């Protein structure tokens, strides 16, 4: 720990008893702990890159603030962060090995956000989701021909409290125009630290509504035709919410129908940032193009039995997401204008146009749903798409915004 190294964490300003502090949090919530630090302490932590010794940090602190910070103070901060599993240390690695082994042995992917993001009891959860559908009841009702089939949807993966109505607007399209036996779910992989473009799991998903079976025949078909390990990085499924939230809504809709159960194919999509940075299309990556071709062939063969879901948010702009200034009304307007342009390509089921609209600005909006939306557009068997809802969740305390949308895809 002479050269402390920070893991990937979230840092954002908060007010605690009138004091301005910085909240440090592990997005994967491994320890269940959060740490509050002062702006001066944040400066020290910013030097926890594995390259600066405690003496180096003392020297830089002196230059910045004109006073000495004692080594014991830095060591206490290191100990505090290590206890919260926020450092890349032996303590963290040992804990990670333990949970990876437990996850590997378990046949079920337990809910990671039950009791945190939504109620633990099934009756309370049912009532909660019902309120979202009531809110959406008279909102932007999709008027489609009687013989239309919903082939896919884009749904948010933002927390239910902010995006509940938008979720309901999307899943209403499944309730009204689709009754799938299999749901292929492309989820955003927010925290996977591997280069695998798509990460599979064969585990069933468990929520307060019960257990949903994963279609292992499709999983095995994908594995059989791919030369690389599709399970590499599977531990990312353990705490990722982007698929879990879709499963919860699927179970609710299935309960409303009182019909047959469904199976899922959970697919975490890693970031396409390198492709955006290099200006190369995802289709130029052999692994991406092969995998999506396999999915498209499976969708073609299953036809009406399958529906594709992308659990995807859009822009992440403002101080919380590394931008130099808080969002203003003009920035919000710009975000909406660019989001609308990107979604117009989605309506035309133009995966390359959608990607290009993000690549040309070098992902200035930080679209976390780029890879799952691109994957849906590349594989869905539909004639057209339709924007059903668009919203922006503003965070005044952090001067930031997250945008999201709901879409349906039909034939």
Image (cartoon, grey):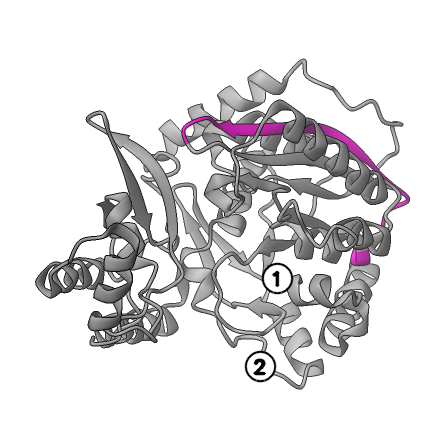
Q: Nearer the viewer, residue 30 or 214?
A: 30
> Mark 1 vs mark 2: which is more N-terminal?
2
The verdict on residue 363 being magenta is no
Q: Position of residue 366 (x, y in %)?
A: 62, 49
- Front residue of this view, candidates 297 and 366: 366
Res. 111 visible in picture: no
Residue pointed to by mark 2? 229
Residue position for label 1 = 271
> Would residue 128 be found to the left or right of residue 166 on screen?
left
Quarter assignment of residue 178: top right
Find residue 290 and report its horizontal and vertical position in percent: 77, 75
**Any mark on residue 377, and which?**
none
Quadrant showing the N terminus: bottom left
Q: Residues within 10 Å of mark 2 (few under 14, many from 20)?
A: few
Tell me the quarter of the picture where residue 334 sits.
Answer: top right
**In the shown orientation, is residue 273 left or right of residue 108?**
right
Residue drawn at x 25%, y 50% as measured from the top left: 65
- What secondary structure is marked by label 1? loop
Specify start and end residues of the magenta stretch as a single range: 378-397
For image coordinates 49% across by 72% down, the residue present is: 233
């Amino acid at each position: 720990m002479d050269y402390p190294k920070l893991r990937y964490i979230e840092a954002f300003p908060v007010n605690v008893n009138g004091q301005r502090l910085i909240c440090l949090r592990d997005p994967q919530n491994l320890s269940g702990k959060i740490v509050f630090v002062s702006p001066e302490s944040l400066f020290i932590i910013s030097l926890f890159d594995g390259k600066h010794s405690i003496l180096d940090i003392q020297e830089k602190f002196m230059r910045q603030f004109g006073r000495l910070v004692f080594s014991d103070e830095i060591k206490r901060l290191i100990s505090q962060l290590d206890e919260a599993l926020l450092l890349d240390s032996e303590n963290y690695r040992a804990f990670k090995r333990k949970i990876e082994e437990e996850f590997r042995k378990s046949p079920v992917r337990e809910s990671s956000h039950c009791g945190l993001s939504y109620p633990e009891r099934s009756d309370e959860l049912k009532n909660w989701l019902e309120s979202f559908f009531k809110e959406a009841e008279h909102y932007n009702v999709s008027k489609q021909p009687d013989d239309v089939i919903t082939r896919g949807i884009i749904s948010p993966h933002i927390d239910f409290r902010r995006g509940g109505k938008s979720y309901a607007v999307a899943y209403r399209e499944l309730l009204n125009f689709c009754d799938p036996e299999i749901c292929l779910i492309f989820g955003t992989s927010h925290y996977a630290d591997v280069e695998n473009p798509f990460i599979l799991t064969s585990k069933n998903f468990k929520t307060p509504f019960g257990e949903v079976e994963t279609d292992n025949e499709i999983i095995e078909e994908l594995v059989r035709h791919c030369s690389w390990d599709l399970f590499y990085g599977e531990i990312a499924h353990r705490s990722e919410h982007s698929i879990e939230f879709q499963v919860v809504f699927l179970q609710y809709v299935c309960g409303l129908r009182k019909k047959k159960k469904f199976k899922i194919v959970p697919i975490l999509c890693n970031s396409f940032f390198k492709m955006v940075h290099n200006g190369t299309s995802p289709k130029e990556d052999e692994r991406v193009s092969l995998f999506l071709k396999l999915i498209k062939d499976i969708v073609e063969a299953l036809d009406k039995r399958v529906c594709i879901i992308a659990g995807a948010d859009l822009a992440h702009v403002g101080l919380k997401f590394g931008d130099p200034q808080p969002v203003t009304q003009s920035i919000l307007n710009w975000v909406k204008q660019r989001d609308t342009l990107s979604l117009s390509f989605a309506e035309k089921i133009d995966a390359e146009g959608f990607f290009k609209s993000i690549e040309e600005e070098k992902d200035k909006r930080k679209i976390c749903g780029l890879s799952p939306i691109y994957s849906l557009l590349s594989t869905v068997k539909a004639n057209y798409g339709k924007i059903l809802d668009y919203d922006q969740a503003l965070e005044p305390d952090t001067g930031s915004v997250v945008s999201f949308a709901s879409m349906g895809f039909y034939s």
